[in-house]
Image (cartoon, rainbow, N blue to C red):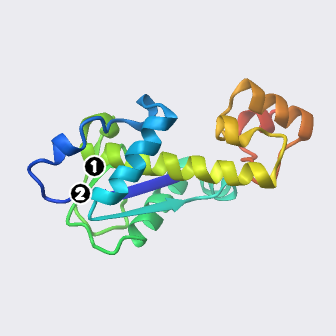
Amino acid sequence: VAAAVVILPPDRNLERSLRGVRDSKQMTPSQREFWSTRLRELVLAFGVGFASSQTIDALGIVPATRLAAQRALNALEITPQHLLLDYLLLPDLEIPQTSLIKGDARSLSIAAASILAKTARDARMVELDQEYPGYGLAAHKGYGTKAHREAIIKLGPSPIHRLSFSPIRDL
């Protein structure tokens, strides 16, 4: 799992500059790549954090997502004054926080962070495709597509697969 955090600059024209930034799941890969590059140029700071499949299996998806978010925060060069989070809260932090349901559709900063997290995760999947050929990770980016499930059945799980992922768990 990947999580990202961004600190946007205080700019009256920011919404105009970032028109087109929205929930990363609603964008094409080329739109996400364009905005990922553009955001990296515009934001005051950003960080991306990951949690491995083994961590997800050991802790569960929500604690692993919190860990990835904490790692993203640790990568920042600036301490945020307030966090807007998509659905989650980070209970171990003393920074004020607001959790927004469907936050990536309601907040420009959350949408921007979702783009940076998604493009970082996709890039990691392309790298892992070289290490673990045959699974099609560069194509489906690790999502549970039919081709991915068929590759797991044919090849068995790789070291990066979540053992709690139902096609693997049900083998």
Residue 24 higher or lower than 162, as above or below = above
Looking at the image, tell me whether mark 2 or mark 1 is earlier in sequence order: 2
Quarter holding the C terminus is top right
On screen, residue 129 versus residue 28, left or right, reads right
Q: Are marks 2 and 1 in contact (CB under 8 Å)?
A: yes
Q: Position of residue 52 (x, y in %)?
A: 64, 58
Disc number for residue 11? none
Residue topped by disc 2: 8
Residue 146 higher or lower than 99, as above or below = above
Residue 128 higher or lower than 154, as above or below = below
Q: Amino acid at mark 1?
A: Ser
Q: Position of residue 161 (x, y in %)?
A: 75, 47
Farthest residue toward the bottom?
A: 77
Residue 171 appearing in the image:
no
Residue topped by disc 1: 109
Q: Residue at x 84, y 40 (%)?
A: 134
Crowdedness of circle 2 by 10 Å Cα count: few (<14), some, many (20+)? some
Q: Residue at x 30, y 34 (%)?
A: 105
Q: In front here: 28 or 6?
A: 28
